Image (cartoon, rainbow, N blue to C red):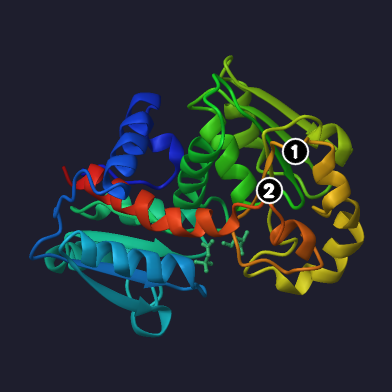
Amino acid sequence: MPRSLCQITDFTADELKQIFELCGKMKNGEISPKPLEGKSVACIFTKASLRTRVSFEVGISELGGNAIYITDKEIKLGERESVADAAHVLSRYVGLIMIRTFKQSDVEELARHASVPIVNGLTDLVHPCQILGDYFTALEHLEPKERYSVAYVGDGNNITNSWLNLASRIPLDFRIGTAADCQPDPAIVEKARANSESRILITEDPKEAVADADVIYTDVWASMGRKHLVDEKVDKLSKYQLNNSLLALAGPKAIAMHCLPAERGREITDEVMDGPQSVVFDEAENRLHIQKAIMAFLLQ
Ligand code: CP
Ligand code: NVA
């Protein structure tokens, strides 16, 4: 079975370090490998996307390959035919499969049956490419430190779960400020807590979460597929809004992050998004570089 990225925990700490190094060298132009020369990549999307679609298509082209955009209308994964059969068929045509969908189990099923690498471009459970790109962005902006403190405020979702997955592999002081019933995945929390080099704090007090943190992160309160819950989430999560007064508790050197798309005025204010501590568009750019490094790593 080829290596895939279904979740960040598919990589060891040493492999993650190699990917960040590769990303840096590819971004600064030191190396420009073409592991996809003469190959195509199937990019399956059953949810909307701007960043993931465009950054993968550009990255695939820069690695020498050709991207094929496939929506659920054509393949109806698991409905028109089994995920396993689709994996066998796609493996005869393409050198890698990228997928954004709802169920994490579909991504893992695809990886079990494909004979080419699978890259998870977001599921309801996790968004590994995003958090690997975000950690790379943090490395670019922050002074070197053994263990960064990252405060996530808002809905416990695929982004939160991916930070927890990162904390289970590399030392992180990860704090989550969220409401009692907006918690991240309990099994993923438990795995992160099993890494004795990381510290995991889950609190209902947003001020406790962000105090002196290096990174303050937020994401939409209602994720794709859950937009109908938005009013309920607004009631529960308003006090976790990332605004200037919350950011001030982290100090002037902290960076403000958001995976985007943002619902300005809801989970994050314009003053933070457009303010001097915001690195949100660097995060968006780094999706391109980190995904090129992930694909090159998996194809080596
Ligand atoms: N951050 C991110 O994955 O953006 P898209 O949903 O636009 O791909
Ligand atoms: N949590 C968000 C992330 C979007 C990139 C969602 O799943 O919609």
**Residue furthest to the left:** 38
Judged left or right of residue 38, residue 194 is right
| 148 shown above or below 146 | below
Label 1 neighbour load within 10 Å: few <14, some 14-19, many 20+: few
Query: Is label 1 in a helix, a strand or a loop?
Result: loop
Q: Is residue 276 left or right of residue 7?
A: right
Of labels 1 and 2, earlier in sequence is 1
Residue drawn where x is 7% and y is 65% of the image: 38
Residue 218: tell me if it is visible: yes
Task: Give the residue at x 70% y 62%.
Answer: 274
Please state if 267 lies on the left or on the right of 133 as rendered.
right
Q: Quadrant of the C terminus?
A: top left
- Disc on res. 252: 1
Q: CA distance from mark 1 to mark 2?
A: 8 Å
Residue 151 vertical placement versus 34 (above, below): above
Residue 43 is situated, as x and y percent measured from the top left of the image, at 32, 69
Q: Amino acid at mark 1?
A: Pro
**Which quarter of the figure has residue 178?**
top right
Q: Secondary structure at mark 2?
A: loop
Q: Residues within 10 Å of mark 2 (few under 14, many from 20)?
A: some
Label number found at residue 277: 2
Q: Is residue 97 left or right of residue 138?
A: left
Name the quarter where the N terminus is drawn.
top left
- Residue 215, image quadrant: top right
- Location of residue 18 in the rendering, given as x and y in whole percent from the top left corner: 31, 32
Q: Is residue 255 above or below residue 111?
A: above
